[in-house]
Image (cartoon, rainbow, N blue to C red):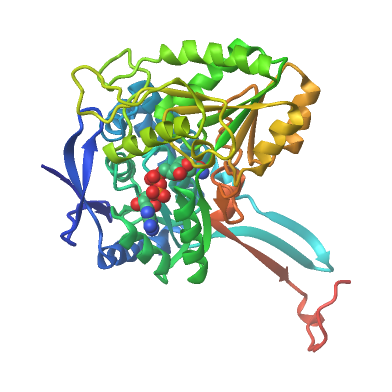
């Protein structure tokens, strides 16, 4: 069986802990490999490599850093099919979706190629007589990233291109469920010419994470994953004096007003709910339909479209939706559908018990559509993270907005309407970090930052874009005077400007 190790100092490193986790092919249900789970000592080795690299990388010229990033972009572009195939093999998402993931990750490499613009400092001349003041951003040193299974390439790419462009060395701890894409990203960085130690990958589970949070040489931790772990990571990092951004889970609502183009709203909701089998932090998992007429018309459209979603393995060129990540997760999602029926939801489509012919052992689930869901039901309250779309009926815009703003999460939301005034009001009223107006999955482009509110993000900074640069750097202000020798004299007074 294939054994997946670590990547440190631009070299593959076999696991030494004796602990391994299974890696599955979700489409066949077979174990395709095992991944080494690092011990604290193995994490220390990777951090030491990063610390050695950070000393010279932090002062490498911007011209050198960006020329390597441009080369990296070319390599990733040339290898995107290979990266997508690795994602499909371990995550299960269909090739078109996997290619989309690589493309969105490449956006951040492109942002990093232009880091020269982001790192330009500020200068005030003659702040006082003969005194200049300059502000600039300095790297932090060694920084770490901990990433989830659902975007095994894109989320690592949200982090390390910005971090290394800013002059840091990086230790990445990818999800142990689908680690190969992250390893390949690091190998390609080595091929692009990044010096040893600038980008290291340590595979592992909680033991590795706990060591990264406690390690005195790790200055900052960027985390993306579920809310309970995000909260714990933020608290652990802060307790050890580290800077941290921890992006958590979500329950994203799409508010559909009576004047919306319902065909467009239904098309959008289907893609946003069932794409990647609902395993997206920006998936739309709740449609809030305003008015029963809107709800009836929308549910009819959703049901027709959902029933037509083609489910299959990545090897089926017509498949639009793949399997879930593990058998346990599939069963957990199915339990929510059954529980919703017990709690009084109307099950319009029941995807439980679905099997793909020839792939009966794969972790597939059909699509489920639940109508008349209420806020008390578990299917509404929890992040299901599967192909289940809930429809909640609201009597008015105000009632729909109140529901959305009562959610403990605040990642994304969307409004579908033809009324510009209503859309404008929604974007001001809604308590989420990212808002779509007739856009179901409003993931910001690379040069704007990504982040939610409330239990969807712990920490001050959003990820990538301008906030990403601020997160991975710290400010320094230099006040300079070159006086004439004759002006020199002792003064014990507090410096005043004149
Ligand atoms: P997860 O929280 O289980 O795992 C994320 C990372 O944390 C992994 O690397 C994992 O090894 C590690 N981890 C798991 N349990 C841990 C523990 N107890 N202590 C320390 N580390 C631990 O998340 P997942 O299931 O891999 O990913 C899905 C979740 O991520 C969903 O909740 C989804 O909404 C969220 N997500 C959020 C965003 C966002 O931008 N807000 C993006 C993608 C995914």
Residue placed furthest toward the left: 1
395 and 416: which is toward the camera: 395
398 sits to left or right of 313: right
Displayed quadrant of residue 492 = bottom right
59 and 178: which is toward the camera: 178
Q: Is residue 209 visible?
A: yes
301 sits to left or right of 44: right
Question: Vertical placement of 177 versus 82: above or below?
Answer: below
Residue placed furthest toward the right: 498
Provide residue 22's location: percent of width, then percent of height: 21, 45
Provide residue 33's location: percent of width, then percent of height: 17, 42
Q: Quadrant of the C terminus?
A: bottom right
Displayed quadrant of residue 290 = top right
Count the marks: 0
Residue ID at (47%, 33%)? 340
269 sits to left or right of 24: right
Q: Is residue 71 visible?
A: no
Provide residue 209's location: percent of width, then percent of height: 37, 60
Residue ID at (50%, 31%)? 283
Residue ID at (76%, 32%)? 398
126 and 485: which is toward the camera: 126
Displayed quadrant of residue 275 = top left
191 and 31: which is toward the camera: 31
Q: Quadrant of the N terminus?
A: top left
Provide residue 473's location: percent of width, then percent of height: 56, 57
């Amino acid at each position: 069986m294939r054994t997946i190790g670590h990547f440190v100092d631009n070299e593959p490193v076999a696991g030494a802990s004796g602990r391994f986790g299974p890696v599955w092919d979700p489409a066949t249900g077979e174990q395709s490999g095992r991944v080494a789970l690092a011990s604290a000592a193995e994490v220390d080795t990777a951090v030491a490599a990063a610390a050695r690299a950070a000393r010279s990388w932090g002062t490498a010229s911007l011209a050198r850093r960006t020329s390597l990033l441009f080369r990296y972009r070319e390599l990733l572009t040339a290898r995107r099919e290979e990266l997508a195939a690795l994602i499909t093999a371990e995550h299960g998402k269909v090739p078109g979706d996997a290619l989309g993931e690589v493309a969105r990750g490449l956006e951040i490499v492109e942002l990093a190629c232009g880091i020269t613009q982001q790192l330009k400092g500020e200068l005030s001349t003659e702040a006082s007589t003969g005194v200049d003041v300059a502000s600039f951003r300095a790297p932090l040193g060694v920084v770490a990233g901990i990433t989830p299974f659902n975007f095994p390439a894109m989320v690592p790419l949200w982090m390390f291109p910005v971090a290394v462009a800013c002059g840091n060395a990086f230790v990445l701890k990818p999800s142990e469920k689908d680690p190969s894409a992250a390893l390949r990203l690091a190998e390609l960085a080595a091929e692009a010419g990044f010096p040893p130690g600038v980008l290291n990958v340590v595979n592992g589970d909680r033991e590795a994470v706990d060591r990264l949070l406690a390690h005195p040489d790790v200055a900052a931790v960027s985390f993306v994953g579920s809310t309970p772990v995000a909260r714990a990571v933020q608290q652990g990092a802060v307790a050890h004096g580290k800077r941290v951004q921890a992006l958590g889970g979500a329950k994203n609502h799409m508010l559909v007003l009576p004047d919306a183009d319902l065909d467009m709203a239904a098309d959008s909701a289907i893609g946003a709910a069932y794409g990647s089998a609902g395993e997206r932090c920006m998936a739309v998992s709740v449609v809030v339909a305003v008015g029963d007429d809107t709800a009836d018309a929308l549910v009819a459209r959703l049901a027709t479209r959902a029933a037509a979603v083609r489910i299959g393995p990545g090897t089926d060129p017509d498949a639009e939706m793949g399997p879930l990540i593990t058998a346990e997760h599939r069963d957990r999602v199915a339990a929510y559908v059954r529980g919703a029926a017990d709690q009084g939801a109307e099950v319009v489509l029941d995807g439980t018990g679905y099997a793909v012919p020839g792939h009966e052992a794969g972790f597939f689930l059909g699509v489920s559509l639940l109508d008349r869901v209420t806020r008390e039901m578990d299917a509404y309250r929890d992040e299901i993270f599967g192909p289940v779309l809930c429809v909640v009926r609201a009597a008015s815009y105000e009632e729909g907005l109140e529901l959305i703003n009562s959610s403990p999460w605040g990642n994304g939301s969307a409004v579908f309407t033809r009324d510009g005034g209503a859309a404008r009001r929604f974007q001001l009223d809604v308590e989420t970090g990212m808002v779509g107006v007739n856009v179901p999955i409003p993931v910001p482009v690379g040069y704007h930052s990504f982040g939610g509110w409330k239990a969807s993000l712990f920490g001050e900074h959003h990820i990538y874009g301008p906030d990403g640069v601020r997160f991975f750097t710290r400010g320094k202000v230099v006040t300079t005077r070159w006086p004439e020798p004759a002006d020199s004299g002792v003064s014990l007074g507090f410096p005043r400007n004149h």
